[in-house]
Image (spheres, rainbow, N blue to C red):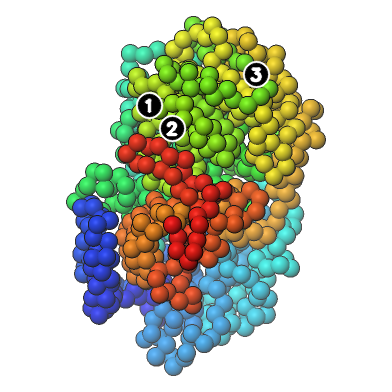
Amino acid sequence: MKFYAKSKRKPLSQEKKDEIKKKLKNIVEKLENELTDADLCIINNSVKKIEEDIEEEQKTLREHQEDIIKCARLFFSQYGAYFTEKEKALVIEACRVHDWGKANEIFQAVVNPEVAKELKINARRTIQIPHGFLSAITISLPEFRNLSELFSEEDFRPFITAVYYHHDREDDYDSPEIRKYGKKYYIKYISQYLNRDIAKLYCSNIYDLLFRNNLCHSKIQDVSDDIWNEYVVIKGLLNKFDYTVSAGYEESEFAVDLEEKKLKKQIECFLQGNVLRPAQKYMMEHKDSNLVIIAPTGSGKTEASLLWLDGEKGFYTLPLKVSSNAIYSRIKDKYQYENVALLHSDSMAKYLKEYKEAYKENDWEICEKYDRSRMLAQPLTVCTVDQLFKFVYKALGTEIFAATLKYSKLILDEIQSYEPHVIATIIYGLKMIQHLGGKFAIITATFPTVLKYFMEKYGLVENEQYLFQDFTGSEYQIEEYPRHKIKIIHAEMDLDEIAKQGMNKKVLVICNTVRKAQEIYSKLKDKSDTVWLLHSRYIRRDRALLEKKIMDFSDSDETGIWITTQIVETSLDIDFDVLYTEMCTAEGLLQRLGRCNRKGRYCPEDANVYVYDNQNGVGKKNVYEKELYDRALELLQKYEDIPFEETMKTEYMNEVYQVEAIRETAYFKEIEKDLELFDNINPTEYVEKEIQVREIKSITIVPEKIYSENQNLFDAGIDFLEEPNISREVRSLIRTKLEDLTLGLSLYQRYPKAVDREIVKAEGTKDKRTRRTMNIHRANCKYDFESESGKGAGLLLDEELETDGIFV
């Protein structure tokens, strides 16, 4: 009998091809005025691919097994130095064994209709024991020990657990049930496949599993960190190689840079002739160590961290997608490094945009680059922490992230910008990464002492697991003078003074809430013609325009006023002359200072940072915790009206976040609670798709004005996205066009009265038909923006449109 690895992929029938082409033609006709030449090229290429869809030869189980072992061996020829000989042997044997269970009568009848016909069985009506479960009971402990002299009895449990759960299956089977199925459908065929007599199955192996994926037996029993990590490495790499081969690739890692070190050379070439900054020199010299680096804004932290990578596989994480996009573009364009990947929820849209800007002849590389990003295959990936740190929840399917970080270097930029839950996730994740053998570097302008406290509590001790270096001292500064002088004002902002300053300076105003920013903009635009606003309540298309406009403004000789919210704290590289800001927590305030006199262009004789204590956005269910706000304000006063040197900023942060002083704050308690949660978590408590590293309570909305102006796009686009068999490129193209006209609205408290609770559907679509491919809600409130001037307040939630059955 010939055994197959999976069902034969059937090509589309000509009738189905014609149907899809007709749909593509229809969307082109309906959106004729919305599509660029590059868009049309992507759609036309999709039509060509449909025509080229041909029948593929069905892969045998033996071929798949050989392919995955070959993939593993190639990987270890590149990254073998990061693994012990035992780890390599365990992974390769898992690759060999993991699919043996497919050599069972029912599975083969499902993937090969000829077998079903020959055996006269209806396989799809027979309950099938998952093939991973069968694979794991095919090998005994003595047989396992005989595979390698490196293997011990202790290695058996993580090995068979990785094989048993290499697919994330629910498991309510007992030993007699598996034994009965195995005798009837499996033992005869696995003997034939392996060409040796399998006399019995070892169903008692299920009692040696580290855990069971069911509610009754999920808890780990007597498992050390070493054993758990061994399981994570075997399972994670097994999944990685399996995904690679199943996707049609031979290599699990693409463009390995270990020998040539292209990125490092590109950066060194760019910096040629310049004296390396202290942080850059230090990180190069300590490339084999875990690091926590404090360095002021504008001190070359990005280049320092990329030099620390030294050609090794790396992940560069940032708090926001917009800042991830900026660093990705910087590495790709400034340093001409094409092998950098982007990984977040909108990365396909970013790749499509690159394609359209370059307008290439073939778009195959969009899909391939996206695939390789998702498989963590590029030598450098820029991402948000949400993508990587799911493994702390011990959910099935997340092992691949931890296993990949074992042979990688992880850069964490601006760790203090995260909320407490994410900080706890990162600290616990770093503990595990360090234990596995991976490397990390935290690079930040500020590093609260409380973070060092929690790191030490969870096994990350300075000078043992990592090196700490603060480059804020005067001996490290290239600038000859301090960049900031602060004045605290216990009142609302003086708008007349701001308007006056904006006549001959670049003035930045930062508010704690969108509502306040819109209020100030409304008043200031009557006092000045050169005032703009930027916050999160613009549709994506307009926000992108404003982000570009503020950066161009920052680099120009123009003067005027920009009013913003905290979205500029870490995401945009801007430099203004004067800053007017509402008081916030200490880390946010110091980030805001980094947007004023960023490059140290002058020494302020008078205050260039005006801090307003008006309590906006402070308190329960608000942006900032009152206790931390009050403490930050109180301790800031001693730095008022004096040059605020970089060392003072470090002292200030350490004072604010002194451990004993903040123990009773919600901030401290949440970090403590979540770290304890991760320490006591059991496998299968969480499902991967349900894990949220960051709990973002928001909805996607389209302002009524935008919807009315683009109703044809919404009707045609949403209807099109409901259709099956559409290529990812075209689907993402249409989705992006719709998303560009929407914005994400945070739900801090109540659901906004002006926002429709029903999602937008195509005209005439019935509820039972929609697949909810786009959860967009219409907002019946005013949207104010003029694209030519870049002026306008954005979405005004409090200004509900009048309705008489007609939206105006």
Q: Amino acid at mark 2?
A: Trp
Which residue is denoted by mark 3 in the rendering?
488
Residue at left 52%, top 13%? 483
Q: Amino acid at mark 3?
A: Ile
- For the residue labelled by badge 1, is the local secondary structure a helix, a strand or a loop? helix
**Quick one: 183 or 479, which is closer to the camera?**
479
Q: Residues within 10 Å of mark 2 (few under 14, many from 20)?
A: many
Residue 428, compared with residue 370, is above or below; it is above
Q: Nearer the viewer, mark 2 or mark 1?
A: 2
Determine the CA span between mark 2 and mark 3.
24 Å
Q: Residues within 10 Å of mark 1 (few under 14, many from 20)?
A: some
Residue with the most extreme front position: 804
**Tag 3 or tag 2, which sits nearer the N-term?**
3
- Whole-percent x, y for residue 685 in the image: 68, 60
Q: Which mark is residue 553?
A: 1
Which residue is denoted by mark 2 in the rendering?
532
Residue 51, compared with residue 364, is above or below; it is below
Q: Nearer the viewer, mark 2 or mark 3?
A: 2
Q: Residues within 10 Å of mark 3 (few under 14, many from 20)?
A: many
Residue 270 occupies quadrant: top left
Determine the CA span between mark 2 and mark 1.
11 Å
Circles 2, 3 touching at the beta carbon (< 8 Å)? no
Residue at left 32%, top 50%? 352
Circles 3, 1 touching at the beta carbon (< 8 Å)? no
Left or right of 278, for residue 673: right
- For the residue labelled by badge 2, is the local secondary structure a helix, a strand or a loop? strand
Q: Amino acid at mark 1?
A: Phe
Residue at left 74%, top 57%? 221
- Whole-percent x, y for residue 133 in the image: 58, 70
**Quick one: 468 or 764, which is closer to the camera?**
764
